[in-house]
Image: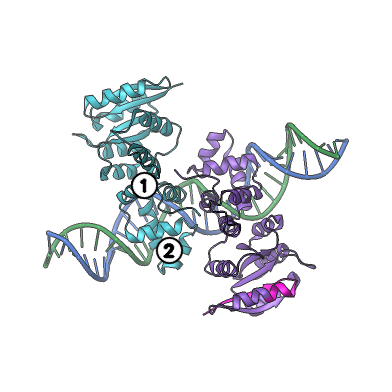
Chain colours: A cyan, B purple, C blue, D green
Amino acid sequence: MPVTVLLVDDEPLVRAGLRAVLEAQSDIEVVGEAADGAAVIPLVRRLRPDVVAMDVRMPLMDGIEATRAVLRTVERPPKIVVVTTFENDEYVYEALRAGADGFLLKRARPAEIVHAVRLVAEGESLLFPASVRQLAAQYGDEGGNRAARAAMERAQLTEREAEVLRLMARGLSNAEIAARLVVGTETVKSHVSAVLAKLGARDRTQAVIAAYESGFVAPG
Amino acid sequence: MPVTVLLVDDEPLVRAGLRAVLEAQSDIEVVGEAADGAAVIPLVRRLRPDVVAMDVRMPLMDGIEATRAVLRTVERPPKIVVVTTFENDEYVYEALRAGADGFLLKRARPAEIVHAVRLVAEGESLLFPASVRQLAAQYGDEGGNRAARAAMERAQLTEREAEVLRLMARGLSNAEIAARLVVGTETVKSHVSAVLAKLGARDRTQAVIAAYESGFVAPG
DNA sequence: ACGAGCCTCCCCCGCACGGGGGAGCCGGAC
DNA sequence: GTCCGGCTCCCCCGTGCGGGGGAGGCTCGT
């Protein structure tokens, strides 16, 4: 069976574009549209889409609130992909923190949009690293280093958080990081939580993956 | 205060070599020697070293048994570095499974030996990736790919375990891996445990790090 | 026919982890 | 002066994770 998608965006043009791109795929079906986050809940209940493509900035209820609302009130909620215009949109991170499964740039190439929808439908998170890859591909940056580093900076990690992430990427436990930094484990937990939230990672493993994928830490 | 080390090796020559290399460092002190694993326990109790450099193959009690014995009977046990002659020594993995914190090739360069001791003393595990780096440096293999892949093969992951590791390295949880492979979570747990044991990793994060460091999975 | 290795699933159990709160301290910005 | 962000630490709490066992079925080689 095909992947069913619900589009939520206040601009009809964008919805049309998404619909055109996605319906060109035989395994993806757009089952509905909404012009504002406030209309999402009943639509999700009725249509039970696999994926919701959710705009961040909308007049009545924005994508962050809508994401929270869906995840809070719907059982077996759909995967949520946040759609944004600006790559440095801090609201996106808010949305990821709220439980969104990935995000998507409106200017991304059709193939990338399709890919993103398929990925989250499969249950994978379109995290930080994925966005890095998209950006890198977009700007034709072979190494991806510049884009990757820019993306990591976009996550706005504080110095301390970056330090903690580096130690996480060396395999240290919270207790070991605490010993190394000469602080309490509770402090480390705070930093780790901040890192996870900012990177849109679910656990430390995903954060370390993001660190490798973005070039924040280098193998070898 | 300096890092205190106990040397355990049946060959006096090796002990002398290790002593010379380590004592050349102002922050490392060799506090004792033993010629067999059977003599380790009382020595550890008396000397309370930070690190034990333990040979694998010894006449009476081998390094695996000795490692197990120390970890089982001594409270606040020292870090244990397993020393071996052959890079494809399967006993080394037995020892890591028994709880050793790292391993070391006898033919490693002095600087590497010193580095290894310092690392484990700091509480870091000298895992798989570290050995890969040593091997790569040793053979002048810039990319380290050949050596890394050989090392990963040495871990003898089964097909299923390799598959699970790949999914771990994509950030999936046990439940998600189970769903993907259409098996029970208990099964996944078994595979994950096997992977951790074979790689000498403490948790999934360290396993994923090993996967990246060894080139088993590639960033980007 | 038998063992070895792999894959599968089961139990119990302890703990590190991560979420969700809150709070105090400090320094720099306004 | 006030506000804000970063760093620090605290509580409670659920659960995913990993260890340590065991066990049955399967294929393969001898």
Q: Is residue B68 magenta?
A: no
Q: Is residue B12 magenta?
A: yes
Query: What residue did someone put label 1 on?
Result: A148
Q: Is residue B120 left or right of residue B73?
A: left
In the image, what residue type sits under mark 2? Thr
Q: Is residue B55 above or below residue A155?
A: below
Work out whether residue B175 or residue B22 is closer to the camera in this orientation and state it: B22
Q: Is residue A132 left or right of residue B20?
A: left
**Tag 2, which secondary structure?**
helix
In the image, what residue type sits under mark 1? Ala
Q: Is residue B168 above or below residue D26?
A: below
In the picture, which quadrant includes the C terminus of chain B?
Answer: top left
Work out whether residue A124 or residue A105 is closer to the camera in this orientation and state it: A105
**Tag 1, which secondary structure?**
helix
Mark 1 to mark 2 CA distance (whole Å): 30 Å
Q: Is residue B56 above or below residue A27?
A: below
Residue mark closest to the camera, 1 vs 2? 1
Q: Disc number at residue A185?
A: 2
Work out whether residue A55 or residue D11 is closer to the camera in this orientation and state it: A55
Q: Can you see residue A109?
A: yes
- Is disc 1 surrounded by few (<14), some (14 to 19) or many (20+) residues within 10 Å? many
Residue sitting at x 59%, y 45% = B189
Q: Earlier in the sequence, mark 1 or mark 2?
A: 1
- Is disc 2 surrounded by few (<14), some (14 to 19) or many (20+) residues within 10 Å? some
Q: Position of residue B81 (x, y in %)?
A: 63, 66
Which quadrant would residue A165 be assigned to in this image? bottom left
Which quadrant would residue B60 be assigned to in this image? bottom right
Confirm whether circles 1 and 2 share one chain: yes
